[in-house]
Amino acid sequence: MNSTKALYGKPIVWALAAIAAVGVGCWVYQLVGGLAVTGMSNVTSWGLYITNFMFFVGLSAGGLIVASSAHVFGVEKFKGIALPAVICSTVCIVCAASFVLIDLGGIQRVWRIVTGANFASPLVWDMCVITIYLVINILDIVFIVKKKERAVRRLSFVALPVAILVHSVTAWIFGLEIAREGWYSAIMAPIFVASACDSGLALLILSLVGLRKVKLFELSANTVASLSRLLATFIAVDAYLIGCELLTMAYPGGQEAATVLATMTTGATAPFFWFEIIGGLLVPFLVLVASRKPIGTASLVFSCVLVVMGVFCKRVWLLFSSFITPNIYAAPGVTAGTFEAQQNPIGMWMATGTYAPTAIELLVTLGVIALGVLIWMILSRKLLGKASNR
């Protein structure tokens, strides 16, 4: 309890609270001005918020997959990290849901999601599975803290497929969008799940290292070695699936797919693509498997940071590469729908998709992340501190 109270006096807590408050203020400004205050338009209708939604859903699913697998498959060494894994998973899914609500624009009409739901839409599927997923996370935390091992094990048999499903449904939002070349793919869901496993595990490792540093969690060398080997395996699977997708797109015969591939590899989203391939997959994999000795903390943290950053870059190039070319080709293009376009009727037409996040979007995003870190710190101090005291 003393450690929890001491948390509120730390400068980092007040800094995070201030960033979160600024983010809330910018979100209110966005509600007043509408989504026109963002960098989105009629051509690029999804931006930084949906990018972060995909990113945080993956981070969340990866954490719960590891925690649930420990009980489903009886991996004893991973049962000890179940509680911090579920805490990470809960915080990340709350952040992901927040980005969806922020992207809706008119939050005052959010009740229409329930009263006017179209159950043929993958967006409604995602809403349902995220709600179920959040409930499972909360129940998992309660059962673990109360040491109800039988209940945790039973819940894990539900949590594991739901954790896989939550990111699969997110992938189907894109994979079933046949109007956008580069999105619809039969293996989009496996790609999303693979990236969720490596990024979620990488974030979990980073959180475990941080918790060990503040003496809230004991992390053995044996557990570190097992987690690093598992992370290397996840990275390899992720790289293989991406290679399969790239081969399909590069094979001669599809002009639209070739255009998207060119955008990814040499166009506007190329920096994100190549960072993900080299920095997010190749480099961390080599670091994790190259040494015959147990990997050091610095090398492990370096690899995990690269994996997380790489998966974020993947979300960027996946989303925006297909927005570059509008799916309506009639001249003079598509109306932009922005504030600037309203003031300039002559220049309101867009023939090519462009996007850059505004200061409002960046501050709102930082606010959500800061709030998520605050929640993680409080839950970790309270729940892990209580467990260690026992």
Image (spheres, helix red, strand yellow):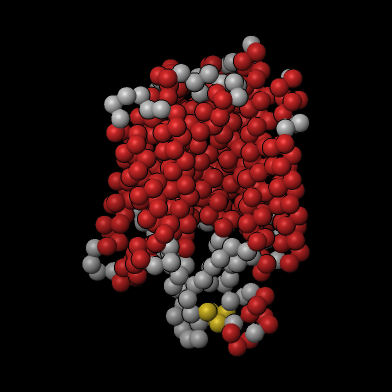
Residue 77, horizontal then vertical, whole percent? 43, 18
Query: Can residue 125 be seen at all in this image of the molecule?
Result: no
Q: Nearer the viewer, residue 17 or 337?
A: 17
Residue 25, horizontal then vertical, whole percent? 76, 55
Q: Is residue 341 left or right of residue 250?
A: right
Which image quarter is the N terminus in?
A: top right
Q: As drawn, which residue projects farthest toward the left?
A: 252
Residue 371, horizontal then vertical, whole percent? 68, 42
Give residue 92's quadrant in the image. Answer: top right
Residue 344, horizontal then vertical, whole percent? 65, 84
Give residue 176's quadrant in the image. Answer: bottom left
Q: As drawn, which residue projects farthest toward the top?
A: 390
Q: Nearer the viewer, residue 165 or 36?
A: 36
Query: Can residue 221 be seen at all in this image of the molecule?
Result: yes
The residue drawn where x is 55% and y is 50% is 53
The residue drawn where x is 63% and y is 38% is 373
Q: How many marks?
A: 0
Which image quarter is the C terminus in?
A: top right
The residue drawn where x is 60% and y is 88% is 346
The residue drawn where x is 29% and y is 69% is 254
In the image, residue 33 sits, relative to residue 189, either above or below, namely below
In the image, residue 42 sits, relative to residue 366, either above or below, namely below
